[in-house]
Amino acid sequence: MLTGKRITLIIGGGIAAFKALDLIRRLRERGASVTSVLTRAGAEFVTPLSVAALAGEKVFQELFDLNDESEMGHIELSRAADLIVVAPATADLLAKMANGLANDLASTLLLATDKRVLVAPAMNVRMWQHPATRRNVETLARDGVLFSGPAEGAMACGEYGPGRMSEPLDIVAAVEAALAGGPLAGRHVIVTSGPTHEPIDPVRYIANRSSGAQGAAIARALAALGARVSFITGPATVPPPAGVTVVPVETAAQMLEAVHAALPADAAVFAAAVADWRVVSAATGKIKKTATGDLPAIELAENPDILAQVAQMGADRPALVVGFAAETDDVLENARAKLKRKGCDWILANDVSPETGIMGGAENTVTLITGTGEESWPRMAKEAVAARLAEAIARHLEGSDGG
Ligand code: CTP
């Protein structure tokens, strides 16, 4: 049910716009109110009158409609909603969104909104498969935009393939999932993930074997419980999850800066395998071999400890700071010492000896060490570790509110 939920529905121009009428009906049946914005192209396919009749509300069309600006400006329109839905989302609308263009009411409110956005793309199969659209979709997914479809099938243009807009009931299900709440609704959690790359020269770098799989799984699990997740990731081999805000970084210094920019947060999970050292002054040109066989002298400096900095900060410190301890020897002793030294609240100890296959693998064996106890979890998929951790975080935050 969507009782009391407010949806702003942007109807783009496309033959699928007629399905938006059914979508309005289905959303209202479930108790949502629907404020519609009809783009100029959308109005070529459905009339403002039919949209207004189904929505039971005035339809917004023009950015410079002074009446509307005084009653409800575009900023207000973009923020009063619980969710913005774009259906059909044309290739043009996706391109505008991905590039931050704001030249009409729909694109302006999409740029101004602080709410989650769910898009239901609809376009010709070749347009959907075009590299430009692929790039835009990737950018939007990284920005945390949610997608419903497109579906595969026969299209109005006579071609067959992906590009058909999702059916209204599928979009409704995606809306319900996006608004499902969950125990972490309204919470902001920062997750660092992946390795960092520390440049030696423009073509070489220091790195490690982290795939980013555990961090991505944690971000996905937190988002599934309703959290707003800032996912700050080094160059990982696994793709970032959908539905989180992705901040790609390369070096430890950039990761630290991105973490500070993402604060404040209710909790922070530091799953990144940050390189401990960086090259003091990376060469600006490629370092060449010398005729005499002299080896290059590479001077290292220690990277800032991001976890320790955040755990020991004052006013903006998240209520719960969680670290990982990747160890090969004396796993628990080292992890306990790390918890104290860094000042974090919880630490997940894991044995990353090569024979465990954990680093870069699909499973993990962790012990959760908190200030008050230790829990050894059996070896399980990284997704399962993530789900268990996300639930523990939700319980802890609920408890710390006195709830
Ligand atoms: N970490 C961090 N910034 C760093 C180094 C580590 O935020 N510069 C975080 C990691 O994300 C992890 C925790 O600190 O949550 C521990 O990382 P780990 O590599 O196990 O420990 P180190 O501090 O690097 O200590 P050592 O290499 O001596 O084991």
Image (cartoon, grey):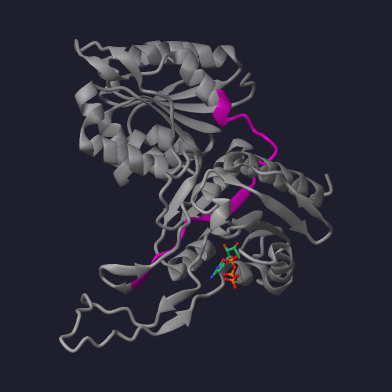
Rendered position, 55 above or below 184: above
Q: Position of residue 25 (x, y in %)?
A: 49, 11
Inspect this view and state whether residue 273 appears. yes
Image point (40%, 16%), residue name: 20
Q: Quadrant of the N terminus?
A: top right
Rendered position, 261 above or below 241: below
Q: Position of residue 116 (x, y in %)?
A: 50, 37
Q: Is residue 234 left or right of residue 203?
A: right
Furthest-front residue in this view: 355
Quarter where residue 73 is shown: top left
Q: Is residue 260 left or right of residue 285?
A: right
* Depth check, front residue: 262 or 236: 236
Q: Is residue 216 left or right of residue 137?
A: right
* Depth check, front residue: 30 or 38: 30
Write down which quadrant ligand 1 falls in: bottom right
Q: Position of residue 329 (x, y in %)?
A: 65, 66
| In magenta segment, residue 178 | yes
Inspect this view and state whether residue 16 appears. no
Image point (32%, 46%), residue name: 100
Image point (39%, 23%), residue name: 149
Q: Is residue 30 left or right of residue 66?
A: right
Quarter where residue 96 is shown: top left
* Depth check, front residue: 135 or 75: 135
| In magenta segment, residue 312 | no
Q: Position of residue 22 (x, y in %)?
A: 44, 10
Image point (63%, 58%), residue name: 351
Q: Quadrant of the C terminus?
A: top right
For the record, the magenta segment spans: 176-199
Quarter where residue 391 is shown: top right
Rendered position, 276 above or below 382: below
Rendered position, 277 above or below 224: below
